[in-house]
Every structure is written in structure tokens, then in C-alpha cells.
């Protein structure tokens, strides 16, 4: 995959994840979502995620896995470090992992509190995904264990996920 040159001249390079990336990926996931470790996000790291680096700092990740429930593939855990967002990194990485896929591709996109739309809407539109189900999953801070681990959690928090698909 070609490098991405940011508007400030920084160059983002890419490679697949390795087991020794555990600690740095845990930090990136925490900066984007909160504690994802206990949900299996760091299991089987060898070649699971495409990673983006600014020097030796991991700044972005995305993965692709078979998903029998959706009868296709699912893009998983796409995140970009807050300081590196709005530079097209996520779009380039998702485009790379889905490039040769010849089956339906699904992705659950988070809608965070106080946001009217999902976080990857621009990328989904640009890459030909369509929203299949709004409110596919909902999380309420008073009843969801996942909310207890979320960095966006507030007492009155309510967020959710929309399901997008790119049909083949």
C-alpha cells in the first residue's frame, strides 16, 4: 500500500499487525473507544489488522474478517488516533483491506453521543457502502457493560451502531 502524506507533510506508512504490537494497539484502541481488550480486539494479532504509523507511533488501524452471521466479510475496529483524524487515513486503509474482496462487506459504524451521524459516514459513502439498518445496536450507559469501558461514557449517555453494507 502506498504511503499517505498528510497536509502537514507527515508520512503515514502501513503494515500488517504482529503479536508484538499488543501494547501499542491497546493504547490506540483505548484512545478511540476505551477498553476493548476484554472483547477480543487484541486476540490473534498476527496479520489481523492493517496498521498506519507516523514513524514508530501507531496512529490508525482497521481489520477485515469473515462473518458467518452476515454471510460475508466484516470490517472491524477501524480507528484513527484523535490527532490524526480528518486526513483520509481511514478511507485509504478500508479501501486497501476490501480491494480484492468478492463477497458482501459489512461494517458497524458507531454513532457517538451528541453526534447526529455515524463516525465513518464519509468513508462509507466514498467507498460505495449503503446504510442497511440505522440503530442496529444501541448502548445505554445504565444497562450496557460495554458502556462501562467506553471513553465517551456519561451518566445520560446513549450511542449506537448503524449497519452498512457493500453488496457484490
Image: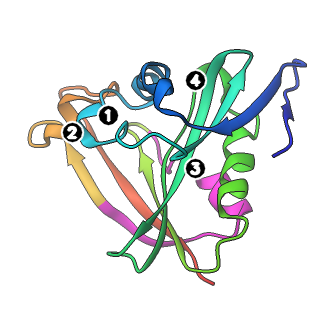
On the rendered structure, is 13 left or right of 49? right
> Which of label 2 and label 3 is nearer to you?
2
On the rendered structure, is 30 left or right of 98? left
For the question of whether residue 166 can be seen, the reply is yes
On the rendered structure, is 35 left or right of 166? left
On the rendered structure, is 133 left or right of 7? left
Percent across and percent down for residue 72 are 47, 76
Q: In the image, what residue occupies the spot 63% across and 60% down?
A: 124
The tag on residue 82 is: 4
User: What element does badge 4 sit on?
Assistant: helix
Percent across and percent down for residue 75 are 51, 58
Name which of mark 4 and mark 3 comes first in the sequence: 4
> Which residue does the numbered mark 1 point to in the structure image?
36
Q: Which residues are magenta?
A: 115-136
Above or below: residue 87 compared with residue 98: above
Percent across and percent down for residue 159 are 32, 45
User: What element does badge 2 sit on?
Assistant: helix
Determine which quarter of the picture holds residue 57: top right
> Which residue does the numbered mark 3 point to in the structure image?
120
Q: CA distance from mark 2 to mark 3?
A: 20 Å
The tag on residue 146 is: 2
Above or below: residue 156 compared with residue 121: above
Q: In the image, what residue occupies the spot 43% across and 29% down?
A: 29
Q: Does the magenta-highlighted stretch encompass residue 31?
A: no
Q: For the residue carrying disc 2, how many other residues have a C-alpha within 10 Å: few (<14), some (14-19), or many (20+)?
A: some
For the question of whether residue 119 can be seen, the reply is no
Amino acid at each position: 500500500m502506498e504511503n499517505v502524506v498528510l497536509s502537514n507533510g507527515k508520512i503515514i506508512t502501513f503494515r500488517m499487525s504482529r503479536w508484538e504490537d499488543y501494547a501499542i494497539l491497546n493504547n490506540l484502541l483505548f484512545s478511540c473507544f476505551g477498553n476493548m481488550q476484554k472483547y477480543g480486539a487484541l486476540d490473534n494479532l498476527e496479520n489481523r489488522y492493517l496498521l498506519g504509523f507516523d514513524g514508530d507511533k501507531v496512529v490508525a488501524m482497521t481489520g477485515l474478517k469473515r462473518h458467518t452471521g452476515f454471510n460475508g466479510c466484516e470490517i472491524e475496529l477501524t480507528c484513527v488516533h484523535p490527532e490524526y483524524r480528518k486526513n483520509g487515513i481511514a478511507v485509504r486503509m478500508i479501501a486497501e483491506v476490501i480491494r480484492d474482496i468478492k463477497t458482501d462487506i459489512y461494517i458497524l459504524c458507531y454513532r457517538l453521543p451528541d453526534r447526529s451521524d455515524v463516525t465513518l459516514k464519509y468513508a462509507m459513502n466514498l467507498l460505495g457502502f449503503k446504510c442497511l439498518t440505522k440503530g442496529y445496536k444501541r448502548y445505554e450507559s445504565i444497562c450496557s457493560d460495554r458502556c462501562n469501558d467506553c471513553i465517551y461514557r456519561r451518566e445520560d449517555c446513549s450511542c449506537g451502531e448503524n449497519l452498512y453494507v457493500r453488496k457484490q
